[in-house]
Amino acid sequence: MRLQRQVNRVVEDKEYSKYVIIVPPEEIEKLHWREGEELAHEVKEESLIIRKAKPLSEEAMRIAMKHAKVKRK
């Protein structure tokens, strides 16, 4: 596994970057992860824990959709 820094964009003299963790394909297969899948993360001391995000409950989804509609107006 490897951590890489990628330049996302450059605006005037300012460089905006993001970091990408390279996970070997065989590890992705073992975890049954798919490209584009939502992941949750947690930092504990000096460790980064990454797991599949739990699906939103119907109530949480309803609240999120209501909030999104209010923001668009």
Image (tube, rainbow, N blue to C red):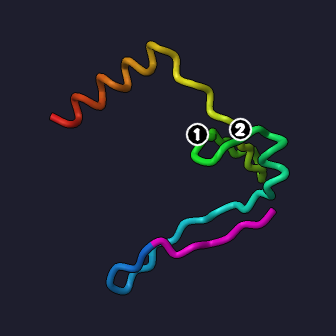
Q: Which residue is at the far left?
A: 73
Magenta-drawn segment: 1-8
Q: Main secondary structure of the magenta part?
A: strand
Q: Which residue is at the far bottom?
A: 13
On residue 51, which mark appears?
A: 2
Q: Percent x, y for residue 61?
A: 43, 21
Q: Circle 1 sits in a helix, a strand or a loop, which is it?
A: loop
Q: Earlier in the sequence, mark 1 or mark 2?
A: 1
Which quadrant would residue 65 be assigned to in this image?
top left
Q: Quadrant of the N terminus?
A: bottom right
Amino acid identity at mark 1: Glu
Query: Would residue 18 appear left or right of 32 to someone viewing this image?
Result: left
Q: Nearer the viewer, mark 1 or mark 2?
A: 1
Amino acid identity at mark 2: Arg
Which quadrant would residue 24 be assigned to in this image?
bottom right
Towards the viewer: 71 or 28: 28
Q: Is residue 51 above or below residue 9?
A: above
Query: Would residue 39 appear left or right of 29 to someone viewing this image?
Result: left
Report if residue 4 lies within the magenta region. Answer: yes
Which residue is painted at 76% across and 38% down in the image?
A: 32
Q: Is residue 58 above or below residue 65?
A: above
Query: Would residue 50 appear left or right of 66 to someone viewing this image?
Result: right
In space, the residues marked 1 and 2 are separated at their CA atoms by 9 Å
Crowding near pointer 1: few (<14 within 10 Å), some, many (20+)?
A: few
Residue behind mark 1:
38
Q: Percent x, y for residue 69?
A: 24, 29
Which residue is painted at 76% across and 57% down in the image?
A: 23
- Asked if labels 2 and 1 touch by Cβ distance under 8 angstroms, the answer is no
Towards the viewer: 56 or 33: 33
Q: Percent x, y for residue 15?
A: 44, 79
Which residue is painted at 62% across and 72% down in the image?
A: 5
